Image (tube, rainbow, N blue to C red):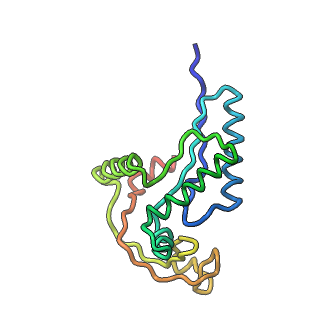
Amino acid sequence: MSEQKKFYITTPIYYPSDKLHIGHSYTTVACDALARFKRKQGYDVMFLTGTDEHGQKIEDKAAAAGMQPKEYVDRIVATVKDLWKLLNVSYDRFIRTTDSYHVESCQKIFQKLYEQGDIYKGEYVGHYCKPCESFWTDSQLVDGKCPDCGREVYDAHEEAYFFRTGKYADRLLK
């Protein structure tokens, strides 16, 4: 007896800083169509979608709305799930990065990588574009502005953790 073939598909985990737009629906419906097709072909499909609920933009938008960040994203996530229901999206799992199982899993993985010496603390210095949520170096800026949207950037210095990629360079290059 042969084991059923597996097929995994995911949308991006969307950033719920505001209401969804047509691009979110397009991506999700396209993934849904592929998931349904693979199920018809007999695959054991896992279709994941969800939201990445951390970041400066969410914190700022929540503050502007007079809310806590979790309360703010809870409202938006409810509209996301309502839209997927309206569009009859057949996802198997909706992940939220604020869910306790997600937080605990990330903490365990981080701790293991840290103990192995794969992660180290350092400082990130660059330029940050809040609308794009992107960091840029001096050489990437266009006339001192964000190369993606053309808006002003601000100097950013923050303590951060980095992954020690050099430790795996030989294996990655093979």
Residue under the point 45% across and 69% down: 67
- Name the quarter where the N terminus is drawn: top right
Q: Is residue 62 left or right of residue 100?
A: right
Residue under the point 35% across and 54% down: 118
Residue 112 on image: x %, y %? 31, 48
Residue 149: quarter of image = bottom right
Q: Is residue 58 left or right of residue 105?
A: right
Q: Is residue 13 left or right of residue 120?
A: right
Residue 17: quarter of image = bottom right
Residue under the point 32% across and 61% down: 120
Residue 94 on image: x %, y %? 53, 46
Residue 119: quarter of image = bottom left
Residue 64 on image: x %, y %? 49, 76
* Residue sticking out furthest to the bottom: 143
Residue 57 on image: x %, y %? 50, 71
Residue under the point 57% across and 74% down: 131
